[in-house]
Amino acid sequence: MSILFLFLGLILLVVGGEFLVRSAVALSFKLNISKMVIGLTVVSFATSMPELLVSLQAALNGFSDISLGNVIGSNIANIGLVLGITAIISSLEIDKDFYKFNWPVMMLFSVMLYFFLYTGGNISRTEGIGFVIAILIYLVVLIRRARKHDEVAIEDVDDSLQMVSYFKIIVWLLIGGAALYFGSDFLVKGAVDIATKIGVSERVISVTMIAVGTSVPELAASVIAALKKEKALSLGNLIGSNIFNIASVLGITAIIKPIFMQSQEILTHDIFWMLGFAFILLPLVFLPKKFVFSRYKGIIIFSAYAVFIALTFAK
């Protein structure tokens, strides 16, 4: 039954996330928001909703380690699993904006998370507000840079959504909201039950199974694109996802319900892996061949991810 809850929860989160993104983009078009702003902000927020609902549901039910493990594990999986497997299938080209803007911001937010947990063992309401203010500043700078350099990541914005009626938007919103609510509830229940039955902590399940589950849609889309030799994955989008996971997911969750760290391993093990995966991207980008994430680099980070999973279950 626990595995059924977990599986059903993941399916509902994927379905709910898809409906929410579609309705949010369609509504943005109705409100005459530019396609660039939709691509950089609306899509990013909407695609972070599954993680937000899982983290919030877990925090409200007293399972703060799932809130933290979900975000930390997702950030590790985005780099080690999604980027690793995609690069193994097809090399990725990386633009200079990666090290000039995206990567430093991701490292800053990652270090902020470590500092908050190290100094207080929790993310307080005030720190949550700090994260939300920081993500809003990031978005303003992101939009200004996009306008200035004319480099807009809008491949996620479907033009056909401009023609969607208000009735459809409302139906999609209701379906998406309900699916996310019940999906997050089932996922947290299933994860807690499985952790209890196999004798591991909720943190282990959240940083591995739940994190991989919430990364599956991105992984599937990236792998299919790579196999078709299309533009497989934007490293900027992947890093943006990590930034949103920390600042908006944990920030909003902490404002509603402060997140208290229950397992010391989050601070002594998981977060160092997250920082390590974030940091290693920079030297890998500059190794020959420069600004190309080749197959052997993909093998390196995917192997590191496999080691992380093995060590997490072994601890």
Image (spheres, rainbow, N blue to C red):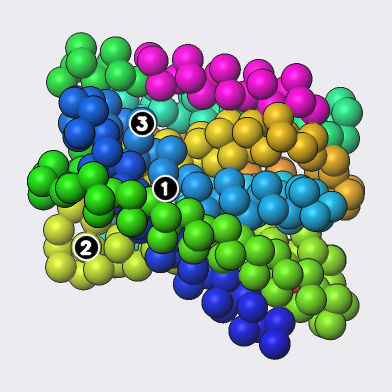
Tell me the quadrant of the picture where the N terminus can be found.
Answer: bottom right
Q: Position of residue 228 (x, y in %)?
A: 15, 68
**Taking 289 as reference, is 221 above or below it?**
below
Q: What residue appears at the point 66 percent right and 49 percent down from the top-left corner?
A: 55
Q: Which residue is mark 3?
A: 41
Q: What residue appears at the point 70 percent right and 64 percent down from the top-left corner?
A: 188
Q: Earlier in the sequence, mark 3 or mark 1?
A: 3
The majority secondary structure of the magenta stretch comes to helix
Q: Which residue is mark 2?
A: 225
Tell me the quadrant of the picture where the C terminus can be found.
Answer: bottom right
Q: Nearer the viewer, residue 129 or 244?
A: 129
Over which residues does the magenta segment extend?
124-141
The amino acid type found where label 1 is placed reads Thr
Closest to the camera, between mark 1 and mark 2, is 1
Task: Tell me if residue 99 is in the magenta stretch.
Answer: no
Closest to the camera, between mark 3 and mark 2, is 3
**Taking 34 as reference, is 17 above or below it?**
below
Q: Nearer the viewer, residue 262 or 265?
A: 262
Label 1 crowd (10 A; few <14 / some 14-19 / many >=20):
many
Q: Nearer the viewer, residue 81 or 221?
A: 221
Q: Which residue is mark 1?
A: 47
Q: Earlier in the sequence, mark 1 or mark 2?
A: 1
Marks counted in the figure total 3
Give left or right: position of 296 versus 122: left
The amino acid type found where label 3 is placed reads Thr
Q: Position of residue 107 (x, y in %)?
A: 56, 29
Q: Earlier in the sequence, mark 3 or mark 2?
A: 3
The amino acid type found where label 2 is placed reads Ala
Q: Position of residue 178 (x, y in %)?
A: 50, 60
Q: What residue appears at the point 77 percent right and 49 percent down from the top-left corner?
A: 60
